Amino acid sequence: MNTGFRDDPRLHAYIDNELDVDDRAELLETMYEDTDLRNQVCELRRIKDLVQQAYFVPPPPPQAHASRRGFGQRRSIAACCAVLALMLLSFAGGWLVHSREDAASLTDHLAGLGAIRLDTGLGTEAAPPRVLLHVATDNPVKFAGTLQQASYLLNKGGRDGIEVEVVANAGGLKLLEANDNSDYATRIREMMRKYPNLHFVACGITLHHLEAAGVPVDLIRHVRVAPSAVEEVVKRLRQGWMYVNI
């Protein structure tokens, strides 16, 4: 068991999304092998959210026409959190050239996002690219950025059979709330209809804590619920997916 991260300030930096790409990759690789470390990260994330909730000052009452129910105005208690394999389809002529250009562009784009893929020894380099986007904060800029990145990847890598999954936990779960007044919900439904290779996943531990606090969450239809966000991340890393923390 690797204990290099035990009681390490980098755990807190990871939870606060302040780790650089190299340190984040090292931590994810360690979590990949160490179940106890994954549990420790989850517990630290839970404690942080409890502290934030204790000091949270509720917003003023909404206006008559701006009332929203559910998770939208509540700070969640959450669990923690944690492919680049860009080859071409065997098509001839101009299609093949264009596909190569798209693959190179997509590779550069993912590298610019600080994407991480662990060496699992599964030989995924020749497989269609698979990308996991992770959002864990209630931040409209990150919500919009997550959907923008998903659309870009699917449009750019469609010929290569790219697969994209968005996993949300903590405040990020608000992105997946089935709210008729939410532009995000409307856009996600449209994207689900347009891209059969796009999937959205909610953290089951976040949902459990919200329900225990009396805040039921109505998720967008066809959103899958995973046991936890960190387990989903580790599972995908083991399968050779590329991980991007939004």
Image (cartoon, helix red, strand yellow):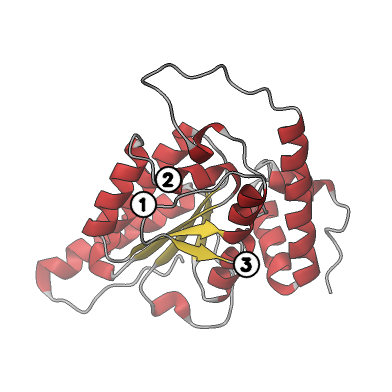
The percent coordinates of residue 181 (x first, y second) are: 34, 34
Q: Secondary structure at mark 3?
A: helix
Say which amino acid is labelled 3. Answer: Glu
In three-dimensional space, the C-alpha distance between marks 2 and 3, rounded to whole angstroms, equals 20 Å
Counting other residues with Cα less than 10 Å from the Cα at mark 2, is it few (<14), some (14-19), or many (20 or more)? many
Which quadrant of the view contains residue 1? Answer: bottom right
Q: Which residue is mark 3?
A: 231
Say which amino acid is labelled 1. Answer: Ala
Counting other residues with Cα less than 10 Å from the Cα at mark 1, is it few (<14), some (14-19), or many (20 or more)? many
The percent coordinates of residue 54 (x first, y second) are: 76, 32
Tell me if residue 33 can be seen.
yes
CB-based contact (under 8 Å), mark 1 and mark 3: no
Residue 240 located left or right of residue 164: right
Above-or-below relation of 144 to 155: above
Above-or-below relation of 187 to 120: above
CB-based contact (under 8 Å), mark 1 and mark 2: yes
Q: Which mark is residue 150?
A: 1
The percent coordinates of residue 215 (x first, y second) are: 58, 44
Q: Residue extending furthest left?
A: 93
Counting other residues with Cα less than 10 Å from the Cα at mark 3, is it few (<14), some (14-19), or many (20 or more)? many
Name the residue: 38% across, 52% down: 220
Above-or-below relation of 131 to 19: below
Name the residue: 53% across, 18% down: 61
Which quadrant of the view contains residue 3? Answer: bottom right
Q: Which residue is mark 2?
A: 146
